């Protein structure tokens, strides 16, 4: 699995396909987060912005290999494992970027009323909650479920929006927890949202990895 | 490896490509798949390689080390040829150093060593195909699936791939292939599967001059200096050889295939001057190579010193294949092969 992750990460990083989603995220943060604003609100925003970025990143990882190269890896490692490696790579990099963003936003935000540590830990739970929910959207809106690029992108954009506003979505829960916390100046770590997102992502990964060899 | 009532359709409601396919894939054998265009040969190969899962039925007993070569491999990946092979070697379970060494070796063997540092996107179609073939051979797969892998290779690389296939067979691997050239590895297939109308049926191996049994092709370790020592087409060697098949005319001299000298009924290797397969027939193998013979030799051959630093092994015909396989696996060079008492 390590070799597969290294291969997928190599593909992503060397192809410079990572640049576009990263620039999008940087633009979100640059526009939406100002130095000196209440830290929890800023963390909520930066976590929410991670969702479409993670969805995009997962889609990139799932589609970056030409079919011939994918077949070769599938024969060597198993179709399901190859798919899982792409999903994990696509989700792991946004989680890493989100973690860095949380630390940076905590450092420049206004931490009055909430401790820096409490704010950072709330942010460090919200970021993966949103990133993993985004990864679920990305996994479900690309192959093997949606192969036509047009439908896939449409589903990706709509799915990302819905995942941010639908009640019951871990991302919405995590984001709301932070934004409400900003108003009342109480950092409430969104454990449940993070755990929920993790479960959802695991279930989606299991489904996608089983489906890939059958549907394609 | 076994397929039980396997069916495959594209997507959830697509037309069936294959249906009701049940077959036992023999181990340590060359398997050819034939059929006209669009009948599902590639689908069958992808099912065997584990790239696609069957829509119905099941596939059991696939070896862990499986490798696949697609027909076309002009992939635009952001790696150099060597980096790609190292990645694939590691995916197949090799360590970093081993993967790098093997990648260099195989590129060298296919005459693509000069392109090791070239990006995959800039490679010509033929060189891309060499990379595709090299990745499959990196980690000694126990199941090698070749979907028209020879297409696009130059003559030298095609011969090298034939040799590599024989080496894999000699070490007990199963090789399944499709090729549009009917003379490709002719007479060496143990089984031929014909794909037509969504079904697969076993057909007679097409080879002239041999029985329907398994044919183990072997050639001397695939290195030019080794291959040069094999008497390929001389009438003398044909007359003498138990199962030494005359190479087909043309530049394929180094492809001289050693057919399995079968024992028992059904053996039908038509060679004058020898009684292949007769009970008690003994085979003389003249070899040279490393400092000492591999530890355990199949069939317990009698060992004697031959001319010019060679070693002469004499063994029952029944064990000659296993012995040849062991010797080739240990990179020994086979000089001559013949029945006992006939000068070779």
Image (cartoon, coloured by chain):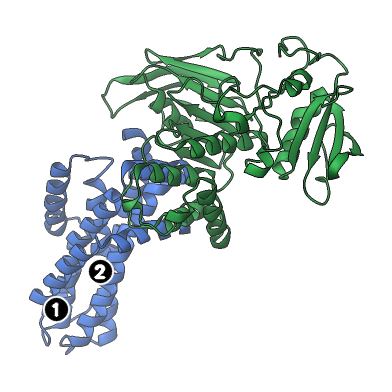
Chain identifier matching the green colour in the rendered picture? B
Task: Give the secondary structure at mark 2.
Answer: helix
Disc 2 crowd rating (10 Å Cα; few below 14, some 14-19, many 20+) is many
- Residue B204 at x, y percent in the picture: 56, 11
Q: Report whether residue B172 is seen.
A: yes
| Closer to the camera in the image, B320 or A84 | B320
Identify the residue position indicated by label 1 in the image: A182
- Residue B7 at x, y percent in the picture: 40, 22
Q: Is the residue under label 2 in contact with that under label 1 (CB below 8 Å)?
A: no
Which chain does the residue under circle 1 lie in? A
- State the hue of chain A: blue
Q: Do labels 1 and 2 share a chain?
A: yes
Q: Report whether residue A189 is seen.
A: no
Identify the residue position indicated by label 2 in the image: A127
Which chain does the residue under circle 2 lie in? A
| Closer to the camera in the image, B169 or B157 | B157
The quadrant of the picture occupied by the C terminus of chain B is top right
Count of residue discs: 2
- Residue B252 at x, y percent in the picture: 57, 29
B70 with respect to A54 (left or right): right
B242 with respect to B195 (left or right): right
């Amino acid at each position: 699995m390590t070799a597969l992750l290294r291969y997928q990460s190599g593909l992503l990083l060397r192809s410079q396909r990572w640049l576009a989603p990263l620039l999008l995220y940087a633009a979100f943060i640059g526009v939406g987060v100002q130095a000196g604003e209440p830290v929890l609100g800023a963390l909520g925003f930066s976590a929410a912005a991670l969702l479409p970025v993670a969805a995009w990143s997962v889609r990139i990882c799932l589609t970056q290999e030409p079919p011939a190269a994918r077949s070769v890896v599938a024969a060597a490692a198993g179709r399901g494992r190859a798919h899982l490696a792409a999903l994990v790579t696509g989700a792991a990099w946004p989680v890493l970027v989100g973690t860095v963003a949380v630390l940076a936003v905590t450092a420049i935000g206004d931490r009055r009323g909430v401790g820096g540590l409490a704010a950072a830990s709330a942010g460090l739970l919200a970021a993966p909650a949103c990133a993993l929910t985004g990864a679920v959207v990305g996994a479900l809106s690309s192959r093997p479920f949606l192969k036509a690029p047009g439908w896939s992108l449409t589903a990706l954009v709509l799915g990302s929006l819905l995942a941010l506003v639908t009640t019951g979505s871990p991302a919405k829960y995590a984001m709301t927890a932070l934004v409400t916390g900003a108003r009342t100046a109480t950092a409430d770590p969104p454990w449940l949202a993070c755990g929920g997102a993790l479960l959802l992502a695991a279930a989606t990964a299991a489904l996608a990895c089983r489906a890939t060899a059958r549907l394609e | 490896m076994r397929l039980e009532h396997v069916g495959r359709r594209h997507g959830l409601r697509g037309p069936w490509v294959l249906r009701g396919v049940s077959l036992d894939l023999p181990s340590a054998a060359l398997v050819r798949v034939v059929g006209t265009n669009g009948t599902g040969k590639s689908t069958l190969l992808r099912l065997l390689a584990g790239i696609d899962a069957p829509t119905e039925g099941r596939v059991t007993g696939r070896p862990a080390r499986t490798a696949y070569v697609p027909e076309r491999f002009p992939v635009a990946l952001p790696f150099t040829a060597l980096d790609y092979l190292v990645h694939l070697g590691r995916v197949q379970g090799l360590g970093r150093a081993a993967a790098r060494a093997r990648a260099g070796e195989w590129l060298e063997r296919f005459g693509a060593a000069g392109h090791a540092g070239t990006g995959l996107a800039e490679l010509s179609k033929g060189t891309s195909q060499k990379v595709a073939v090299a990745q499959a051979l990196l980690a000694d797969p126990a199941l090698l699936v070749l979907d028209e892998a020879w297409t696009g290779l130059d003559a030298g690389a095609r011969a090298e791939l034939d040799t590599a296939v024989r080496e894999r067979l000699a070490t007990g691997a199963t090789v399944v292939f499709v090729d549009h050239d009917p003379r490709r590895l002719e007479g060496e297939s143990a089984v031929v599967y014909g794909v037509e109308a969504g079904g697969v049926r076993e057909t007679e191996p097409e080879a002239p001059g041999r029985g329907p049994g398994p044919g183990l092709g072997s050639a001397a370790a695939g290195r030019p200096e080794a291959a040069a020592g094999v008497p390929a087409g001389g009438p003398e060697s044909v007359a003498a050889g138990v199962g030494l098949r005359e190479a087909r005319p043309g530049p394929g001299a180094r492809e001289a295939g050693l057919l399995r000298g079968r024992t028992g009924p059904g053996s039908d290797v038509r060679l004058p001057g020898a009684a292949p397969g007769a009970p008690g027939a003994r085979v003389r193998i003249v070899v040279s190579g490393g400092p000492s013979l591999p530890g355990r030799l199949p069939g317990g051959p009698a060992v004697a010193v031959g001319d010019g630093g060679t070693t002469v092994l004499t063994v029952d015909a029944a064990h000659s294949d296993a012995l040849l396989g062991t010797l080739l696996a240990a990179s020994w060079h086979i000089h001559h092969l013949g029945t006992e008492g006939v000068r070779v």
